[in-house]
C-alpha cells in the first residue's frame, strides 16, 4: 500500500508535466545537395530556426580539410567541390551543438559524380528526372538550367518540411519511452523483491 | 543540455563513461526496493520534461528536472537519469549513444550535489522553509549542470568563459521554472507524503 501511496504523488506530477504540449527541442538539422556544379546545404534547428552566418568546415573522409564556407542570412551555404570524394560538412554551433552532414560520392554534382545518373537520395530524385527529360530533347542548355532551377525552388519547402517531420516527436514514441521506463523499473523491483525473498528465506532457515 | 555525438574529444567521452558507470553502480547499491517505483517515476518525469522547451534565442532550452530527482533519490538519481537519457537518445535522438556517459554525469552529478547541499534544509520542520530549499535545489542543479557542460566543452577545446556564459545565460529561464516546480513539489510532498524524504534517510542510515 505504501508503495502505491509513494507512487501517486510523483505520478500526478509527471502527468501534469506530460499534459503540457510537447514542443520540438533544439536538435540540429543539416542537409546538403547538389545544385548545378555546386553543393548547397542548409543548417538549422529542429524548431525551424536557421543557423545564420555560421562558419562551416568541409572535410574529406580521412579528416583532411577541404575548405571553409559559411551560411547566409537564411541558413544556406554553398561549396564548390573539386574532388570526387565523400564530403563531410561540419559546423560547430556552440554549447554542444554540432551539425554534421555526410555527402556520399553519388550525391555530388553531376560533373564530379562522373556524369552517371545520380542515386535516389534526397532532393536529387526530384530534380534529376526533370533534367534528364529536358536533355533528351533539343532544348538549349539555358532552358535546361532554368527548369532545373525552378524544380529546385519548388522542392525546397518540401524538403524542409520532410526534415522537420523527421524530427517530430510523436506521441507514440513518448508513450513508448514511458512504457520502457515502467518496464525497466518493474523488472528492477521484481529482482529486488526476489532477492529479498531469498534472503528472508535463508534467514528463516537459519532461525529454525 | 544534451551534448551531441562528435562535439567532445575522445578523452572527455571516455572519462564521462567511466564516471557514469561508477555513479550508476553506486546508485544501484543505494537503490533499495521501496525507492524503485519513485526512481521510475522520476526517470519518466525527466524523460518527458525534456520535451517541454523554453525558447531562448537563437535556440531553445528544455526542462531537465534533475534537481527534484536528486533531492528525492540521492545517488540513485544516477541510474534513474541514465535510463531517461538512454531512451531519449534512442527515441528522440537527443544526445547520442557514445556521449551517453558524459551526459549522464553532467545531469546526475549536479543532482547528487543538490541532494547533499539541500538535504538538511528540506528535512527542516517547516514545510515552507523546506519548499524554499527545494527551490534552491532545483535551480542549483541546473546551474551546476551548465557548469559541468561548459567544463566538458572546454576540455574538448572550446573557451571556457564563452561556453559557460552562453549555456548559463540560456538556462536562466529553466532555473527559474524548475526552482518553482521543485519548491512546489517539495512543499506538496512535505504536506502530503513526508515519508518520501524520510524514508531514504532512515534506510541509508541503517545501511551505512
Image: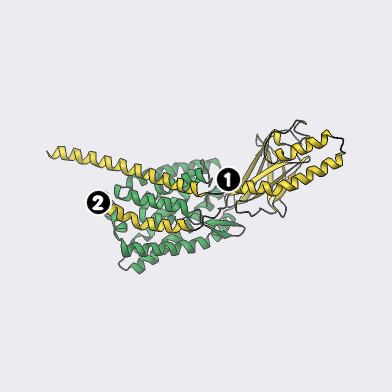
Would you place residue B167 above or below residue A152 in this image? below
Colour assignment, chain B: green
- Label 1, secondary structure: give it: loop
Badge 1: chain ID: B
In primary-sequence order, the first of circles 2 and 1 is: 1
- Label 2, secondary structure: give it: helix
Badge 2: chain ID: B
Give coordinates of residue A156: x percent, y percent. Answer: 71, 47
- Same chain assignment for discs 2 and 1: yes
Residue A129 picture quarter: top right
Quarter of the figure with the C terminus of chain A: top left
The figure's colour scheme reads by chain
Q: Which residue is mark 2?
A: B206
Q: Is residue A69 visible?
A: no
Pointer 2: residues within 10 angstroms few (<14), some, or many (20+)?
few
Q: Is residue B189 visible?
A: yes
Would you place residue B71 above or below residue A177 in this image? below
Residue in the picture at 30% in, 56% down: A5
Residue in the picture at 54% in, 40% down: B10
Colour assignment, chain A: yellow
CB atoms of marks 2 and 1 within 8 Å: no
Relative depth, front residue between A198 and B157: A198
Furthest residue in direction left, as rendered: A208
Give coordinates of residue B111: x percent, y percent. Answer: 42, 54
Horizontal relation, residue A45 to residue A181: left or right: right
Instruction: Give me the C-alpha separation between circle 2 and circle 1.
Output: 43 Å
Give coordinates of residue A181: x percent, y percent. Answer: 41, 46
Horizontal relation, residue A107 to residue A169: left or right: right
Give coordinates of residue A187: x percent, y percent. Answer: 35, 41
Would you place residue B130 above or below residue B204 in this image? below
Q: What label sits on residue B7 in the rendered view?
A: 1
Horizontal relation, residue A136 to residue B130: left or right: right
Amino acid at each position: 500500500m505504501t508503495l502505491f501511496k509513494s507512487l501517486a504523488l510523483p505520478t500526478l506530477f509527471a502527468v501534469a508535466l506530460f499534459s503540457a504540449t510537447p514542443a520540438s527541442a533544439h536538435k540540429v538539422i543539416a542537409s546538403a545537395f547538389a545544385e548545378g556544379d555546386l553543393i548547397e546545404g542548409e543548417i538549422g534547428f529542429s524548431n525551424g530556426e536557421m543557423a545564420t552566418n555560421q562558419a562551416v568546415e568541409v572535410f574529406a573522409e580521412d579528416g583532411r580539410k577541404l575548405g571553409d564556407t559559411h551560411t547566409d542570412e537564411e541558413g544556406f551555404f554553398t561549396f564548390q567541390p573539386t574532388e570526387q570524394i565523400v564530403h563531410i560538412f561540419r559546423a560547430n554551433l556552440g554549447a554542444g551543438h554540432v551539425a554534421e552532414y555526410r555527402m556520399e560520392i553519388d550525391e555530388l554534382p553531376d560533373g564530379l559524380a562522373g556524369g552517371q545518373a545520380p542515386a535516389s537520395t534526397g532532393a536529387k530524385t526530384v530534380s534529376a528526372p526533370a533534367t534528364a527529360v529536358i536533355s533528351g530533347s533539343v532544348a538549349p542548355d539555358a532552358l535546361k538550367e532554368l527548369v532545373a532551377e525552378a524544380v529546385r525552388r519548388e522542392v525546397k519547402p518540401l524538403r524542409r518540411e520532410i526534415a522537420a517531420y523527421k524530427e517530430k516527436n510523436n506521441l507514440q514514441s513518448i508513450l513508448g519511452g514511458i512504457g520502457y521506463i515502467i518496464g525497466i523499473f518493474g523488472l528492477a523491483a521484481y529482482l529486488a523483491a526476489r532477492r529479498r525473498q531469498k534472503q528472508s528465506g535463508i534467514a528463516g532457515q537459519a532461525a529454525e | 543540455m544534451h551534448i551531441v555525438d562528435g562535439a567532445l574529444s575522445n578523452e572527455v567521452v571516455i572519462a564521462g563513461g567511466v564516471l557514469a558507470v561508477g555513479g550508476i553502480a553506486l546508485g544501484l547499491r543505494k537503490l533499495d526496493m521501496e525507492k524503485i517505483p519513485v526512481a521510475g517515476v522520476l526517470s519518466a518525469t525527466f524523460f518527458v520534461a525534456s520535451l517541454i522547451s523554453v525558447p531562448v534565442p537563437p535556440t531553445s532550452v528544455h526542462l531537465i528536472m534533475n534537481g527534484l530527482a536528486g533531492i528525492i533519490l540521492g545517488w540513485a538519481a544516477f541510474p534513474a537519469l541514465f535510463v531517461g537519457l538512454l531512451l531519449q537518445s534512442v527515441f528522440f535522438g537527443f544526445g547520442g549513444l557514445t556521449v551517453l556517459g558524459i551526459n549522464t554525469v553532467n545531469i546526475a552529478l549536479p543532482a547528487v550535489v543538490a541532494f547533499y547541499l539541500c538535504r538538511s534544509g528540506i528535512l527542516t520542520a517547516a514545510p515552507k522553509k523546506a519548499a524554499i530549499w527545494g527551490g534552491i535545489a532545483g535551480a542549483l542543479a541546473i546551474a551546476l549542470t551548465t557548469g559541468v557542460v561548459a567544463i566538458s566543452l572546454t576540455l574538448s577545446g572550446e573557451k571556457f568563459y564563452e561556453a559557460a556564459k552562453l549555456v548559463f545565460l540560456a538556462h536562466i529561464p529553466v532555473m527559474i521554472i524548475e526552482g518553482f516546480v521543485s519548491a512546489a513539489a517539495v512543499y506538496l510532498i512535505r504536506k502530503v507524503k513526508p515519508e518520501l524524504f524520510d524514508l531514504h534517510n532512515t534506510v541509508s542510515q541503517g545501511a551505512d
